Amino acid sequence: MKKLILYYLIATVSFTCISQESNYPYKWPMYNDINVDLSVENPSFEFNEGPLVMIDAAHKNFFVQSHLIKPLVDIVLNDGYRVSFIDKKLTKENLNQAKILIIITALPFDFATQSSAAGMETYTENELNEVQAWVNNGGSLLVFSEHAPFDQAINPLLKKFEIESSVGVTIDTLNYDKSYNYRMIVFKGNNLNNSHPLVNGKYEVKKLVSFGGSALSGEKYDNILKLGNSSLNVKHQTGNGPLGSGNSQGLAGFYGKGKVVAFGDSNGFTAMIFNNEDGSKMYAGMNSEGYDWKNFVLNTFDWLSK
């Protein structure tokens, strides 16, 4: 049986910096913020001695293909974890080598080449069952939905863990960042679950903002990012939705012997700059001024690793 070869990312390994001039596969309006501070003052582990974090790269994962995953990889490495990308089907053999599995922006096709993933297979039924069994036996899953069509693609996996994502895009007509628009949903006070270690853990988290995405429902999990009555699921510009609803953009809890953390939006775990049509720039993720995404990301991995 062939053994999975793990390519550990160390500080000397470089990613091609995604920018407006990227060749994959179009010119995107967003790119990595190379000036964001991703240092960790007191790492959880000595360098490259922590648990293995495995990132799915076999399912047209847009953030992996476009290298927008790089800031997340950098901060995880800086906190002492080991990191590998898995570019083959998810099986018991390769999953058992990891403590944490990240599934982010998965699709059955390259992003923006088609508008809908409805009725299409992103993960095989065997892969879904393997991931479910791995978590049930003690693995930790960090999984992201997003706006359409990512929500359609990830729903079969979420449903294995009794979670469901709306389809379309989520907005909030009251709890949003007034500097931008209804899709910039703000979580603070009662909308942020400060009784959970993702919020009240090793690092202080007082305020977060999401950037659209989808709404989640999952009654057996703790609601970390609570959507209010002013939130709505609306049609996405791809023409998908609105279908379904939810009361959360962040769920966390136990599944069997393992753990699951699911988010309706993935941008908080990045550090992107968007070039707006008017020439201004918008910062999304761990580089968003006034929000605590960097601390929240570190708390999330701390909880999943234990």
Image (spheres, rainbow, N blue to C red):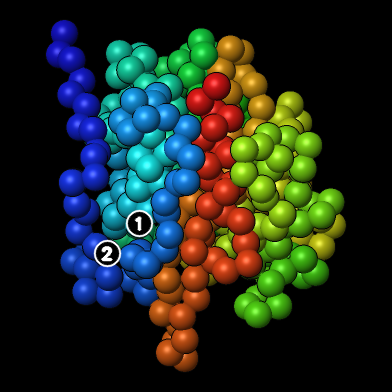
- Residue at 80% across / 69% down in the picture? 174
At label 1, the amino acid type is Leu
Category of crowding for the residue at label 2, using alpha-carbon neighbours closer than 10 angstroms: few (below 14), some (14–19), many (at least 20)? many
Given residues 38 and 249, the one toward you in this image is 38
Can you tell which quarter of the image residue 4 is in?
A: top left
- Left or right, 46 with respect to 269, comes to left
- Residue at 62% across / 38% down in the picture? 202
Given residues 167 and 271, the one toward you in this image is 271
Q: Looking at this view, name the residue that lies furthest to the bottom.
A: 278
Marks 1 and 2 close (CB-CB < 8 Å): yes
Quadrant containing the C terminus in the rendered view: top right
Q: Residue 246: percent from the left, percent from the top?
A: 72, 46
Vertical position of residue 139 compared to residue 141: above or below: above
At label 2, the amino acid type is Ile
Q: Residue 267: percent from the left, percent from the top?
A: 50, 57
Vertical position of residue 130 compared to residue 39: above or below: above
Q: Which residue is mark 1?
A: 68
- Mark 2 lies on a secondary structure that is loop
**Disc 1 versus disc 2: distance between alpha carbons?**
7 Å
- Residue at 38% across / 43% down in the picture? 78
- Mark 1 lies on a secondary structure that is loop
Can you tell which quarter of the image residue 20 is in?
A: bottom left
Q: Disc number at residue 18?
A: 2
